Image (cartoon, grey):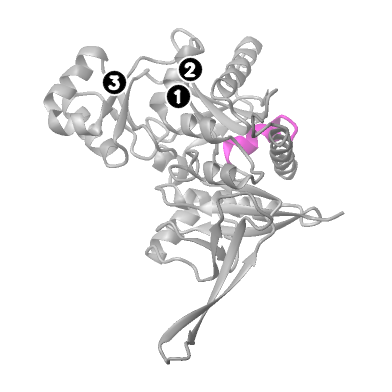
Amino acid sequence: MKRLRVGIIYGGRSGEHEVSLASAAAVFAHLDRSRYEPVPLRIEKDGRWTLAERPPTTMIAADVIEHARVDSGRSPRATREVYLVAHPSEETILSIARSPGRSSGGDADSQALVTGLGLDVIFPVLHGPYGEDGTVQGLLELANVAYVGCGVLASAVGMDKAMMKAVFAARGLPSVDYMVVRRGDWLASPDATVKAIIDRLPFPVFTKPANLGSSVGISKARTEEELHEALRVAAQYDRKIIIEQGLERPREIEVAVLGNDTPEASLPGEIIPSREFYDYEAKYLDEGSQSIVPADLTDRERVELQRLACEAFLAIDGAGMARVDFMLDRPTGRLFLNEINTIPGFTTISMYAKMWEASGIGYPQLIDRLIALALERHADKQQLRTSAI
């Protein structure tokens, strides 16, 4: 049987570049070589696409981040540039190998060897803006290439927390009270902005960049002074800031979703952060955070979490995979949707993989399922008419 050529896109031009390296390393390490031929497509921090000389090595996220710090942001040597031709063709993704040469007039020139990569499916392992937000998915749609995961709309809604919450509300799904502040309004009137937030939401509150993941730029504010600082931090990462009503010591529960039109949900897992909440350091740098899979829940709670996770997935028109995060209020037992992640952390020790393993689907099988779902969805789209005539 002919092996499928799988282009794995990783890295990216976002604050979650290093997290993507860790996820991609796990995919490369566990892709069945008897069925698939992986092709490493790395997006550098400056946005250049390259055919990497070698795929990322298997490391946990903290090791990758530390390696990146030591490396001072230098990019690994790549043999060829990569370009995606944004129209359907036999060779949609091209690699270019450049070699120095001289023209007949003696002026310095360049010669380039252009090769089509002949990929069967793309597996984006990108986190954050310019990868998880529908931008790469839009390019792949234009080129009519099969790809793993959510489409343009679901990716964009899943990345933008303000739009996500609006969609959840329209679907009748439970979320905590929140406000949206634009960076320009905050810069123009910081005191008035803070007063409007305090008048609406009692402390504590959480401030988040609307378009980012991995808990980057998130702060908890208990006072007016802390709120000013929290807005300043979030505004460094996005032009829209979400301010959410905080809950006192909620349980943080997650559910993995897999599928297309008929998604299924995993057993839930619980995060016990090493810090007051599950921020970036607690996720990737501290060793004290714990994950409990499956979470200690009643049957009623488990069933409701799984139902809500699938409802959230369908609400954004998800495809392939997503991880849905919840908060369980201890005093009342109420469940609140926190967010949906359309390309969650994807190492073997990430919650998405661990929850499916506890549900009976191992990591290699999970990769198989995701690629099959991508091909199924792509084949279904090919049945659509593109002309009214």
Q: Nearer the viewer, mark 1 or mark 3?
A: 1
Q: Can the viewer see residue 244?
A: yes
Q: Position of residue 297 (x, y in %)?
A: 60, 17
Residue at image position (71%, 39%) is 366
Question: What label does residue 164 carry, if any?
Answer: 1
Q: Which residue is mark 2?
A: 168
Dots 1, 2 in contact, CB < 8 A = yes
| Disc with the residue nearer the chain's start (1 vs 3) | 1
Tell me the magenta residue range.
350-361
Q: Amino acid at mark 3?
A: Pro
Q: Position of residue 313 (x, y in %)?
A: 58, 24
Mark 2 / mark 3, whichever is N-terminal? 2
Q: Nearer the viewer, residue 101 or 198?
A: 101
Q: Amino acid at mark 2?
A: Phe
Q: Position of residue 322 (x, y in %)?
A: 58, 32
Majority secondary structure in the magenta region: helix
Considering only vertical position in the picture, is 125 above or below 59?
above
Q: Nearer the viewer, mark 2 or mark 3?
A: 2
Instruction: Indicate which disc residue 204 carries.
Output: 3
Q: Name which residue lies at 65% across and 63% down.
A: 116
Q: Looking at the image, do the residues carrying marks 2 and 3 touch, with CB atoms under 8 Å apart?
A: no
Question: CA–CA distance between discs 2 and 3?
Answer: 23 Å
